Amino acid sequence: MNESQQTGSRPASTNAEKLCAGKSADVLAVWETLRIEAAKVAAEEPTLVHLVNDVILSRESAAAALGARLARRLAREDMPRESLEPLLTGVFERHPLIVHSAVRDMQAMHDRDPACFSLLEPLLFFKGFLALTTYRVSHQLWQDRRRWLALYLQSVASEAFAVDIHPAARIGCGILLDHATSFVVGETAIIEDDVSILHEVTLGGTGKQSGDRHPIIRSGVLLGAGAKILGRVEIGSGAKVGAGSVVLADVPPHTTVAGVPAVIVGESSEENPAIEMNQQLACRRSIPHP
């Protein structure tokens, strides 16, 4: 890595982003699964009957369920539930792609997190999923030029979930945000499809410059807990960033980096680290550091 790479001044590549591309989610099938699982919860745990009735069993669609769940978590004195829920549900109903994206995220969490034993669990309990879904609403509002309202949702989501995602950031589908606490995403960041991210990760800038100043995370990337990726750098497809690393330069595809500042320690030992979720730094072979 040369000096310009270490400062993040070299522009990242201009390859087209993969945002909600590829496989589609069967929203209706997932919705039926959620209803079946909610009925089981109601039968097995009476103390949760009100929650699952309100969020799932009394609703007619995944859009309405998402609106109800987020409204329960985000309602405040200045935006009570009776005002917030119709707003959220309306966005989901008018923009089915947001529901599709949320379902892809839900499936990613179920498939990659061994502690997640049902699709219903992220919707009810995982703040990473709820924070991402709130971001998706705020992003749509940002695109609709309702920017004050988008920033309001960003603010209350930060309070509720300890996750701060700027509504202008661009995030694909099939994202696992595990644990989520202290996850920060800057305004011009891009996260492609099928990325896995642990807690305390920052996708930030390096100063006061304007324009594209936050990272690009390509598909299949695994970002370890506490990783800080700063500036307009690109983490290539299938790369892995070790826990606690500080990345100030582009990371080539299918390589593993670690350290402060991060350096290449070898090739990623998996074809798709985001799916495998192997956070060890074992590598197929070492790569000399330039």
Image (cartoon, grey):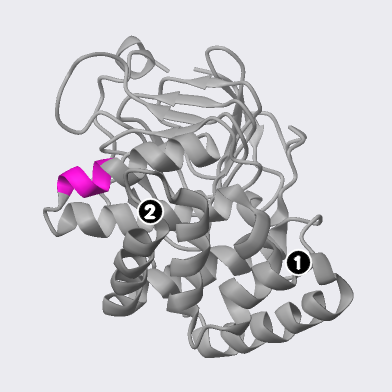
User: Is 186 placed left or right of 264 in the picture?
Assistant: left
Choose between 170 and 166: the one closer to the eye: 166
Residue found 75% across the figure and 83% down from its top: 39
* Above or below 194: residue 181: above
* Quarter of the view holding residue 56: bottom right
Which x, y percent locates residue 112?
71, 58
Extent of the magenta region: 147-151
Task: Give the quarter of the figure containing the N terminus.
Answer: top left
Numbered circle sitting on residue 48: 1
Which x, y percent locates residue 243?
66, 27
Is 59 in the magenta? no
Q: Residues within 10 Å of mark 1 (few under 14, many from 20)?
A: few
User: Is 9 placed left or right of 239 in the picture?
Assistant: left
Which x, y percent locates residue 43?
84, 80
Q: Residues within 10 Å of mark 2 (few under 14, many from 20)?
A: few
- Furthest toward the right, the residue is 44
Numbered circle sitting on residue 16: none
Question: For the stretch drawn in magenta, what is the main secondary structure?
Answer: helix
Numbered circle sitting on residue 80: 2
- Depth check, mark 2 against mark 1: the one in front is 2
Can residue 12 be seen here? The reply is yes
Which numbered disc flags the more N-terminal residue, 2 or 1?
A: 1
Which x, y percent locates residue 180?
59, 40
* Above or below 103: residue 246: above
